[in-house]
Image (tube, grey):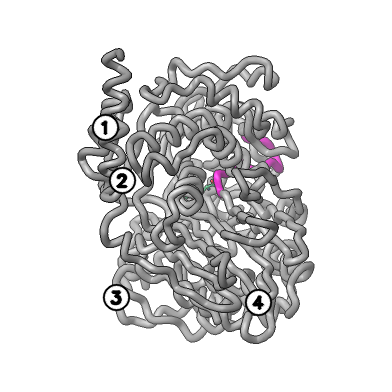
Amino acid sequence: MSQRVLAFFALCLCSLFLAAQTVPAAVQQETPVRTKHAMVVSIHHLATDAGVEVLKEGGNAVDAAVATGFALAVVHPAAGNLGGGGFMLIHFHDGKSTFLDYREKAPLAASANMYLDGKGNVVPEMSVVGYKAIGVPGSVAGMAYAEQKYGRLTLAKVMEPAIRLASEGFVLTEEEAQELHESGLAEFPESKHIFQRDGNYYHAGEVFKQPELAATLRRIAKDPQDFYHGQIAKQLAADIEKGGGLITEKDLASYEVKEREPLIGTYKDYTVISSPPPSSGGVALLEILNILEGYNLSRFGDRSPAEMHLITEAFRRAYMDRSDYLGDPDYVKIPIEQLTDKKYAAAWRAGIREDQATPSAALKRPAGFLPPPPTMADVRHESPQTTHYSVMDADGNAVSVTTTLNNSFGSYVTAAGLGFLLNDEMDDFASKQGSPNMFGLIQGPANSIAPGKRPLSSMTPTIILKDGKVAMVLGSPGGGRIITTVANIFLSVAEEGLNIQQAVDAPRFHHQYLPDVLYLEPEFPDATVNSLRAFGYEVKVSKGHWSDGECIAVDPQTGELEGGQDHRHHYGKAAGY
Ligand code: DON
């Protein structure tokens, strides 16, 4: 037996030995919140309460999702939003599914090189901070569309909790008060005024009221079209123009929600329903799972190095394809069927060595499956705030929503007189060919800026079925790490038998092809880190955590709902009845 094979078996043994230790003891003790009929899980307890209130008043999962979404815009201003965009995946109890794309769009005056200076260099921060970073917001259109087409109640009814929270205010925890200290907000007087009381910062225990936002919410509740075609549109466009941004009344008037077919694939005996482009999430998730389907992962033990190695190699390959092929499907042709083909995954899998990492620089896409990718690489910036929430109702309808301002507090710009923050989603486009962004994500010209185009997203709201019934509702923020977070959570349940709370809280690992680095959350034992290094990985153990899974699982025996509310943050809640 060669040295290498011996080393491999030694690693596997070591992995099995470590298996019991890699999910921290505290996480192993966790049990999910359980409810019999319906549930909402979100990062904010008051947003969850808003959804549950609406469910109890006879609303369905879509009513509750819209109520939760508007409430998050009030109580979680870092990511919940009126001035951003999102994706809502709905699975109806009759077996049908749909996907609402209310992603932001580039303004009509946007152009490919708008973030470059005269020398062709990216102007720092221009696509991230301030008026020029703002994409045409889609959230209000998306939530109103969802409510009108699929809700049981009225928009005015489901917006009541949000309006109440904005006008009466809510008590801030220490964690929330600290979040409002964000220095970028101080750069814009309206934001500084609303979120930082003109510099006299809010403290834990104080009530945070938002009268301007309450007034805007009332106007939307009365007529959501006002945001795109009426007085709100006029005010918003005038304010953005004054600040030097590109969005006009025409941009707002021409915004449209796109209802798309969700991507549907399988993993063993699960059906995976996920996000189509302009999200890269569903394609990449299905590719990852297709590659991994050929292994018996559970034999290795949860988060054992040998298992993490195989999953990482699947991540690496899917992110390479993501880089080269994905963008707005209304602007570029994406070979979705080929990318998510099981035979293509098998060809990828054949190149994975069980004893050794494949350097990304040496990675070769299997020939004969895909058209050639565009030759030039593009830049991608991603940033640390977005939010996900999951809802199920008593009829078995499931809703999975991820929504974002992109960066924490978006562009930091608050629309004057309107009380809500505006996104910096333009930064999800490629600003310049060929140079990696702060997270090192690289992608193809498919995601260059063009007027009216939607920037590529990683948001991956996902619903998993087993035997035709909803088994999990999954999703997370985390920028480029969203896809691997969803994969981590799903595999922890499907392969390792963790309950949804354990799966959400268990330490995550991430690889995105480039940079060729395996990122670990801090809880992995040194022995795991060393074993992974022995596979050939450059391993970086992160000081902090990433993402925020807010998920539901259904107990197949009892039909009860189980909430997995991410304990990385401390003001969230899983609740229902
Ligand atoms: O759409 C996207 O992929 C990004 N705008 C999401 C950003 C994000 O998740 C940041 N959150 N942690």
Which residue is at a point 26% across and 43% down the rendered structure image? 18
Amino acid found under the numbered disc labelled 3: His
Mark 3 or 1, which is nearer the eye? 1
Which residue is at a point 74% across and 56% down the rendered structure image? 98
User: Magenta span: helix, strand or loop, mainly?
Assistant: loop
Q: Secondary structure at mark 3?
A: loop
Residue 115 counted in the magenta span:
no
Ligand 1 lies under 8 Å from the Cβ of mark 4: no
Mark 2 or 1, which is nearer the eye? 2
Q: Which residue is mark 4?
A: 394
Precedes in sequence: disc 3 or disc 4: 3
**Residue projecting furthest to the front:** 1
Q: Secondary structure at mark 1?
A: helix
Q: Are marks 3 and 1 in contact (CB under 8 Å)?
A: no
Task: Please report the bounds of the magenta region as a residue range.
Answer: 449-459
- Percent of width and height locating residue 220: 68, 73
- Percent of width and height locating residue 493: 47, 54
Mark 2 or 4, which is nearer the eye? 2
- Find the distance from the CA under tag 1 to the CA under tag 4: 46 Å
Q: Which residue is mark 3?
A: 203
